[in-house]
């Protein structure tokens, strides 16, 4: 049975980020000198960032499925542990002693997707900490090593980028506060230097993203960091 290739999934994400960067470059050049250049460039920056992080979420989901396709034993063991605990709690040790759990060695990736998420949604995580915790419970040590190797700067970047994505998507007051909280702490020096907000709350995230941090726009810096982090996952 042919297994899913994590390298291919990683390469697809890199291509998608590159295409987004080219798209932003083309459209931003077309806006130069137009009547609403600043407003349109701000909106474009927000839209491209949102697309970039959605692409990252899809990459993470596909990567987890590919790793489980290669070794599904850890997830099955964790699943049986949950079932065993639930049945024991409700019906006692005698009931669980009458049951056994048959594990499968080779499971097609589409079947794994149905098992992990019967609703057919992208596998997403509210925080990087939860993503790493799920990796520990679902993936073999070999496959989760890259997630365990995420640095504090990587974790700060991912959680900040997720907060920005949520605010762009929902524009709720809670998402706004969380985004600004994350932006206040993400810049602890390289490689996240210039990606934070300083002392003042960000009022317009598009303006923030289109602004330059060093020689590059923050949008480009964020997309580049997502791509860089994905290489080690």
Image (tube, helix red, strand yellow):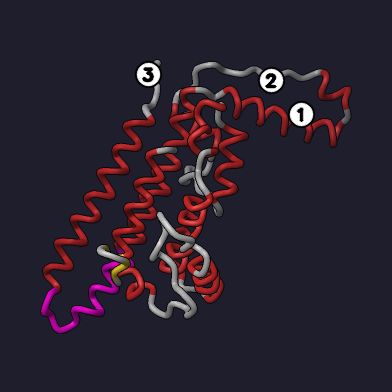
Q: Is residue 127 magenta?
A: no
User: Which quarter of the image is occupied by the C terminus?
Assistant: top left
User: Nearer the N terminus, badge 2 or badge 1?
Assistant: 1
Rounded to the nearest whole Å, what is the CA distance between mark 2 and mark 3? 25 Å
Q: Residue at x 11, y 79 (%)?
A: 33
Examine the residues drawn in magenta and state their main secondary structure: helix
Mark closer to the observer (2, 3): 3
Q: Is residue 57 above or below residue 64?
A: below
Q: CA distance from mark 2 to mark 1?
A: 9 Å
Q: Is residue 227 depicted above or below 25 in this figure? A: above
Q: Which residue is mark 2?
A: 101
Q: Which residue is mark 1?
A: 84
Residue found 41% across the figure and 45% down from its top: 229
Residue 140, image x, y percentages = 56, 26
View extreme (bottom): residue: 35
Magenta extent:
32-47
Left or right: 185 as drawn, with respect to 85: left
| Residue 79: x %, y % from top left | 66, 31
| Percent coordinates x, y for residue 89 in the rendering | 85, 36
């Amino acid at each position: 049975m042919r297994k899913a290739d994590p390298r291919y999934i990683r390469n697809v994400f890199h291509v998608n980020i590159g295409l987004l960067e080219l798209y932003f470059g083309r459209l931003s050049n077309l806006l130069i000198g137009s009547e609403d250049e600043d407003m349109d460039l701000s909106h474009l920056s927000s839209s491209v960032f949102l697309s970039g992080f959605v692409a990252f979420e899809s990459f993470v989901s596909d990567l987890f499925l590919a790793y489980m396709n290669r070794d599904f034993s850890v997830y099955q063991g964790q699943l049986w542990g949950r079932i065993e605990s639930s049945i024991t709690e409700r019906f006692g040790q005698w009931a669980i002693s009458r049951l056994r759990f048959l594990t499968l060695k080779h499971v097609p990736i589409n079947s794994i997707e149905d098992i992990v998420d019967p609703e057919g949604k992208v596998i997403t995580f509210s925080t990087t900490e939860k993503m790493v915790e799920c990796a520990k419970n679902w993936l073999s040590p070999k496959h989760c090593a890259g997630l365990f190797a995420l640095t504090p700067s990587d974790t700060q970047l991912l959680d900040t980028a997720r907060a920005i994505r949520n605010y762009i998507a929902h524009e709720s007051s809670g998402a706004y506060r969380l985004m600004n909280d994350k932006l206040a702490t993400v810049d602890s020096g390289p490689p996240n230097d210039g990606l934070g907000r300083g002392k003042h709350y960000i009022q317009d995230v598009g303006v923030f993203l289109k602004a330059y941090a060093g020689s590059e726009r923050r949008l480009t810096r964020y997309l580049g960091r997502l791509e860089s982090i994905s290489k080690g996952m």
